[in-house]
Amino acid sequence: MIRGADLLLRSLAQSGVELCLANPGTSEMHLVAALDAAPSIRAVLTLHEAVASGAADGWGRVTGGRRVRSCTWGRGWPTRCRTCTTPGARRRRW
């Protein structure tokens, strides 16, 4: 039987995602287990959701590759949204 996490990772891999930066909580343990078994997507666990967001953004800027960030729902949510949902802002030089 195939799990939802496996389907998600298969879809991400077909979309060209190579990296998943994660700060998982208990609700994402199935995704973490599936990431461990997915050969085409490299998983990097971080200690804080802001680190995962910043690293995903930086990696994408430097390599131009697609990346995914998986974090728990919590206080850092606005920061995660701001760093990953503003594609036009990523092109600006500050």
Image (tube, grey):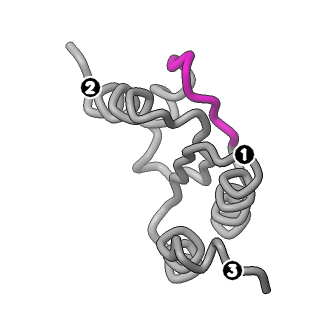
Res 3 label? 2
**What residue is shown at x 29% (from left), y 28% (from top)?**
7
Name the element at disc 2. loop
Q: Which of 66 and 53 is in front in this view?
A: 66
**What residue is shown at x 76% (from left), y 52% (from top)?**
62
**Residue 58, percent across and down?**
74, 59
What amino acid is found at the position of numbered circle 3 in the picture? Answer: Arg
Res 36 label? none
Q: Nearer the viewer, residue 19 or 38?
A: 19
The residue at which mark 1 appears reads as 63
Q: Give the range drawn in magenta.
A: 37-44
Name the element at disc 1. helix
**Residue 64, percent across and down?**
65, 48
The residue at which mark 3 appears reads as 92
Mark 1–mark 2 Cα distance, whole angstroms, equals 31 Å
What amino acid is found at the position of numbered circle 2 in the picture? Answer: Arg
Horizontal side, residue 2 vs residue 55: left or right: left
Horizontal side, residue 66 vs residue 93: left or right: left
Q: Is residue 67 magenta?
A: no
Q: Nearer the viewer, residue 62 or 71?
A: 62
Q: In this view, does 8 lie above or below 21?
A: above
Of labels 2 and 3, earlier in sequence is 2
- Extreme residue in the bottom direction: 94
**What residue is shown at x 26% (from left), y 32% (from top)?**
4
Q: Is residue 30 above or below residue 45?
A: above
Mark 2–mark 3 Cα distance, whole angstroms, equals 40 Å
Name the element at disc 3. loop
Q: Does the magenta stretch include residue 42?
A: yes
Q: Which of marks 1 and 2 is in front?
A: 1
What amino acid is found at the position of numbered circle 1 in the picture? Answer: Thr
Q: In this view, does 11 lie above or below 53?
A: above
Mark 1–mark 3 Cα distance, whole angstroms, equals 16 Å
